[in-house]
Image (cartoon, helix red, strand yellow):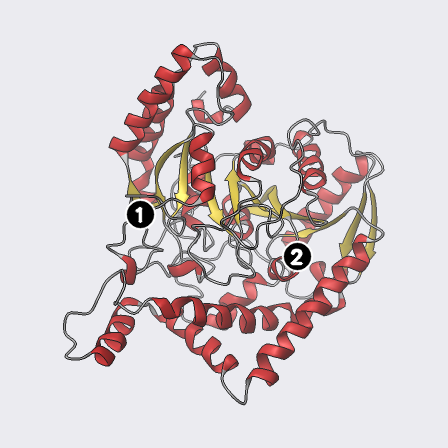
Amino acid sequence: MSLFDLSISEIHKRLANKELTANDLVEESFKRIAEVEKDVQAFLLIDEEGARKRAKVIDQDITVSEDLGILAGLPMGVKDNIVTEGIRTTCASRILANYEPIYSATAYKRMFAGQAIMIGKTNMDEFAMGSSTEHSAFHPTYNPWNLDYVPGGSSGGSAAAVAAREVYFALGSDTGGSIRQPAAFTGVVGLKPTYGLVSRFGLVAFASSLDQIGPITKNVEDAAYVLQTLAGYDEYDSTSANVPIPDYISPLTGEIKGLRIAVPKEYMGEGVDKAVKEKIDEAIKVFESLGAVFEEVSLPHTEYAVATYYILAPSEASSNLARYDGLRYGVRSDSAENLIEMYKKTRSEGFGPEVKRRIMLGTYALSSGYYDAYYLKAQKVRTLIKQDFEQIFAKYDLILGPTTPTTAFRIGEKISDPLQMYMNDILTVPVNLAGLPAISIPAGLVNGLPVGLQLIGKHFDEVTILRAAYAFEQHTDHHKLRPMVKRG
């Protein structure tokens, strides 16, 4: 059995008992990367020297101290929009191809404090704009279950690296489903925390009112371990919530008797693949066998969620991305003859087509004469979507449904049809619009490709989400399935 089949808690025990070293874990990671990375292409940068130095330091700490961090020695991937001091952070964009940050994101610092070891920066859709990791400026990433298919996005590199067992866990970011959707496509666990629970300081902004960092792991218990380290107030983030951080690990008992779960009819309706529905129905039966109570409900404004998201997110992006002008940092066009031309050429040459598309959409929605008709109206609908959830959570503990309407699609299948690509987010974007926590866990295979089950919870109630997900996981074998990393 590979070391990568062990849970974080099992690894922690072996390190504490001196049965393993951090160096053993790092070398296992690089061995696996050498075997599969040429096919999966999950990484944009691999820091072998830095990882080995870090492992040596941690092994020395273990020798002299019994106080191990809960993530000690564990190789991790970090999405390339989370800044890392002195290590290139590109957001998978040509405009930041030479950018080396002078500080690190709070989330990364907390992983460092927990003694995790960064193996490298993972690939993504440029500036987190996409659902397939085909919009990376450097190369696509491939789904380890079938290399002819996408791994999802925008955190596709992080999800693929975990699914292919190149790292133990990875950090991703979720603006409209960018942790949960690739987790569903690659058969791993993806947790999107409540907005404000995890610091966004050092996360390169896409849409500031929606973005959230979270973990991608092999199983639910591992997600709880990573969240325990990630969560917490940060004075450097004005949107950080100063709330008590509970114990996420101890409640993982497998006991969920009496849990009230709502199944929105909109999440199981038109557009959701029949085979995916069948897997979700099977999951419901598992929960019922464990004593959970189900009822069908309605979230009536769900049909407007995608339209609302694709007005608000591009609007915020058009503002956030205005800073990339070649003047302060990043790549600068060397063929311009004056300042205005430098701005134009830098942005034209530096941004990819999807980023340009969203900048134009957002700028249009915010422009004079259209602000009230689009942006303001979208904000009002966002409030209605949030109120829909509040009404459901007044009676129920969780909401359950598929993470995505289909399994992974083929490389190139939707790249030329942006609207078709955007519709893939229909079941994930409502969560971000409402700022809620949600998790995607494996629910089986359809034609050899994973199906994701999504559990949505109340604000700051990650404990219930993790508890229910863990109970389901303990009574199924879906999380134990491993991809072969091959085509066809």
Percent x, y for residue 302? 69, 66
Q: Position of residue 295 (x, y in %)?
A: 84, 52
Indicate the position of residue 72 as horizontal and vertical percent values. 45, 24
5 versus 427 height, above or below: above
Identify the residue under disc 1: 102
> What residue did someone put label 2 on?
274
Q: CA distance from mark 2 to mark 1?
A: 49 Å
The residue at 29%/44% (across/down) is: 87
**Considering only vertical position in the picture, is 321 above or below 261?**
below
- N-term mark: 2 or 1: 1
Q: Nearer the viewer, residue 74 or 266?
A: 74
Instruction: Determine whether 275 is above or below 429 in the image.
Output: above
Quadrant, the N terminus: top left
Q: Secondary structure at mark 2?
A: helix
Query: Looking at the rendering, which quadrant does residue 480 occupy?
Result: top right
Relative to 48, 272 lies left or right: right
Residue at the extreme bottom of the image, as rendered: 369
Mark 2 or 1, closer to the camera: 1
Q: Is residue 205 left or right of residue 252?
A: left
Can residue 401 be seen in the rendering of this structure?
yes
Residue occupying image coordinates x 49% and y 71%: 314
Q: Amino acid at mark 1?
A: Ile
Report x, y in % for residue 125.
Answer: 40, 58
Crowding around mark 1 (Cα neighbors within 10 Å: few <14, some 14 to 19, many 20+) is few
- How many marks the image carries: the answer is 2
* Mark 2 Cα-neighbour bin, 10 Å: few <14, some 14–19, many ≥20: some
For residue 437, which numbered disc appears in the image? none
Judge by depth and name the residue closer to the eye, 183 or 239: 239
Amino acid at dot 2:
Lys
